[in-house]
Image (cartoon, helix red, strand yellow):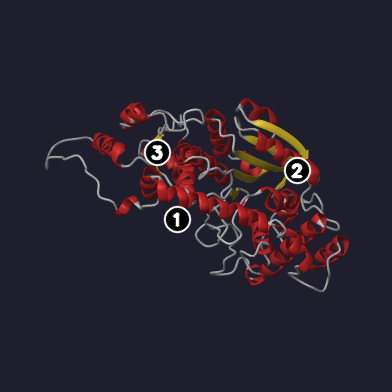
Amino acid sequence: MDHQTVNVIKGLVMDATRKANSGHPGGAMSSADFAYILFKEFLVYNPDDATWFNRDRFVLSAGHESMLLYSLLTLQGTLAVDDLKRFRQWRSRTPGHPEQHMTPGVEATTGPLGQGLSMAVGMAAAECMLRARLGDDICSHRTYVLASDGDLQEPVALGSASLAGLWGLGRLTVFYDANKVQLAGPTCRCDCTDYRKVCEGLCWQVIEVDGHDHEAIRDALRQARAQEDRPTLIIGHTTMAKGTATREGDFETHGAPLPPEEIAATKRKLGLPEDKDFHIPADAAEHYRARFPELRAVAAAWKATFEARLDKDQAFQDLWRVIHRDPGNRSFTWPAFEPGSKIATRSAWGKCLDALVEQLPILVGGSADLDPSNQTMKFRMTTGDFTAATPLGRNLPFGVREFPMGAIVNGIALHGGLVPFGATFLMFSDCRRTSGRSRRRAP
């Protein structure tokens, strides 16, 4: 039944991209096996509340594979088939690339490659910080990423991966859909990187599997879940457009819908009805949702624990209130500056930052190796550096990584519960400019 349900997902991908006359079916079909096993058997979420605080986070860094995510969200009831029929249409809930503010179940706006992985590093860091403050009975979840060849080619991804390894983010798992094909052709034309060696050098656990072997995927996810000290990269060796009748491995399936005749032949091959578009058999949906009672029980148990602590633990109640209160609606005591006095902008910023250290205990962040110049040195010395071993530290030592810093800060904000900042010179801010689009709106 697992393979049959994966085939249903592939049918939805083909139908939606064909109807829209636009989209990326090939990668969505190559990574469907992993995404299906993750969502059906491992991902922890509340089927009735996409914003549940202690849910696992899933980031589709390969945002062009959006129809894969939308198909999974439809199987679980978060989206409707009518949403799939409006894929890539104006004001639909299924834009061409995932938009966090438009679609329930989408954790981050992705599309610009590499940035989803980087934002996931921020989410994993936020989980680690909040777990240390709230307790693992309230905050204890994992962060998963689906990344493509193109994601890892973007330097922002490996810059962020280096920090994830340094910080020891053991609850971060990245599945690398290594189908060896990208939009313009095979990856060997433009990349000779051994990502296993690279990521092992960045202090990651690396596991290689056949990305279409369900049991191998399950075993890799179990290994990732057992590893608490290092992030995990699962390299899934896959085939572009897996399951198609005649187009497996074809780079042209990356960014263009399959022809109608290829879709019909593929449906015959996969055991899907040729005359039915957007078809979800009742038994496939029921099979996919078999874990819902267990997931609802987990969410209900968490709610009971949360309410008990909120009722009896005043310190927890105070912290929870701070975490969920918009800082923009708070009054702060700021340093006084005499009108007409001469003070460098960065010096004024530093004094304001220092004033917030005690007033805003959920303020976290750091500088791109410019601590003395950016006036963040006092913040660093007062709050301490963050790592998994020192999760109460609030200073994030980004190093000379402006672009990764911007994306990681996005991820922390999107996770919720913390107020992040990233500091650099105005000129260097151009290096992180493109990460601004993916920030959008916090949940």
Residue at disc 1, secondary structure = loop
* Disc number for residue 379: none
> Residue 357's spot in the image, x, y percent?
31, 36
> Residue 11's spot in the image, x, y percent?
77, 63
Name the residue: 35% across, 53% down: 326
Rendered-image quadrant of the N terminus:
bottom right
Residue at disc 3, secondary structure = strand
**Left or right: 207 with respect to 391?**
right
> Residue 90's spot in the image, x, y percent?
55, 70
> Residue 280's spot in the image, x, y percent?
75, 67
Residue at disc 2, secondary structure = helix
* Disc number for residue 364: 3
**Left or right: 152 with respect to 131?**
right
Q: Earlier in the sequence, mark 2 or mark 1?
A: 2
Q: In the rendered image, which residue does mark 2 sit on?
A: 217
* Disc number for residue 441: 1
**Left or right: 251 with respect to 326?**
right
The kind of residue tagged 3 is: Val
The kind of residue tagged 2 is: Ile
Name the residue: 54% across, 50% down: 302
The kind of residue tagged 1 is: Arg
